[in-house]
Amino acid sequence: MQANRRRFILGSATGLSTLALGLPSLAHAQAATTLKISHQFPGGTMDAGDFRDRLVRRFAVDVEKNTNGALKFDIYPNSSLVKVNSQFSALRKGALDLSLVPLSYAGGEVPETNIGLLPALVPSYEVGSKWKNAEVGKFLTQVLADKGVVIVTWIWQAGGVASRAKPLVSVDDAKGMKVRGGSREMDMMFKDAGASVLSLPSNEIYAAMQTGAMDAALTSSTSLISFRLEEVSKFLTSGRGKSYWFMFEPLMMSKEIFDKLPKAQQEVIMSVGADLEKFAVDSAKSDDIAVANVYAKKGAKVSDLDDATLAKWQALAKPVWKDYSDKNENCAKLLTLAQKLL
């Protein structure tokens, strides 16, 4: 696998450099450039399965069509190409072409990325949808570009809580529970609520819940379904309507690879990526509703957040925001710009 991967990188770099030189006769003589897309979610088809997998498949088909076959894609679901927590770093180094991955997974490497899962900072899809064209989105785009990553598709997802032995709805419920929050900052909030926390990617939640190593996990509605957590949970706090858990989970591309493409191909990639954002929002909202039905049919007790409960979580989140802001100047600016949308 490593040898094949090295051959791919060397081969595509050679092909891309020729295209970049603007030699049409050589470009037409070459085979199409094949880029690799990695993600951690279950694989499916364009019409069935986890919507994030369906999104990258639609992206691949549309880009290939709109570049007349000059760009093709191989898709690797289930972390089958790159381990979950290595994807962002691989993008930065140009060792991976594209990935759909929660931005906050890179928080240990790039502190600014934890803005993608700050508790209660994005309270709704309406607020999340404003980020891309607002000051905060433009600055985040620049920060990531400086780190070697291009945002192709902006995706926000609401999330909920699956739990084994008792529901986790109110702040008081968290005391004494072993909880997976999904980001450093989310974990901090749960520590302040009296919980102990575990840090692991969403595709490892099932095993941890099954063995009892974890009592409750917060993740997107889509992951609550795709990873079949209803099989190991008796309670669900739904993200439909209201949630303090909104994750930024974009489709991203290595800037090193992106910059080697001809401008026309870059424009196709960004245009197709933007066109898929409505599909992402609609699918995420549908999953917020569907997850409650999935868990109820399995016999789980389903709860929703009311305004008073959400307000208590928001109050608990404020010191966490300050901690994030204190990390560096970029974090402070990102938080300030994000708060303008509240």
Image: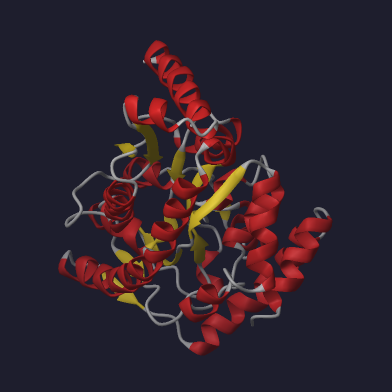
Instruction: Please indicate whether residue 286 sits to the left or right of residue 38 in the image.
Output: left
Where is residue 281 shown, x and y percent of the image? 38, 71
Q: Quadrant of residue 116?
A: bottom right
Where is residue 215 shown, x and y percent of the image? 42, 53
Considering every residue shown, the one lying at the far front of the view is: 25
All told, the count of numbered labels is 0
Residue in view at x 31 percent, y 26 percent: 31
Is residue 166 among the parts visible in the rendering?
A: no
Question: Relative to 220, is 305 above or below?
Answer: below
Instruction: Please indicate whether residue 145 sits to the left or right of residue 21 in the image.
Output: right
Where is residue 22 shown, x and y percent of the image? 51, 34
Is residue 294 among the parts visible in the rendering?
A: yes
Question: Relative to 52, is 304 above or below?
Answer: below
Where is residue 124 shown, x and y percent of the image? 49, 78
Image quadrant containing the C terminus? bottom right
Q: Coloring scheme of the render? A: secondary structure
Residue in view at x 29 percent, y 58 percent: 51
Of residue 24 and residue 123, the one placed in the foreground of this image is 24
Considering every residue shown, the one lying at the far bottom of the view is: 307
Q: Quadrant of residue 27?
A: top left
Image quadrant containing the N terminus? top left
Question: Relative to 148, is 127 above or below?
Answer: below
Instruction: Please indicate whether residue 339 sits to the left or right of residue 46 in the image.
Output: right
Residue in view at x 27 percent, y 58 percent: 225
Residue in view at x 28 percent, y 41 percent: 69
Question: Relative to 241, is 282 above or below?
Answer: above
Of residue 16 and residue 119, the one placed in the foreground of this image is 16
Of residue 2 and residue 36, the one placed in the foreground of this image is 36
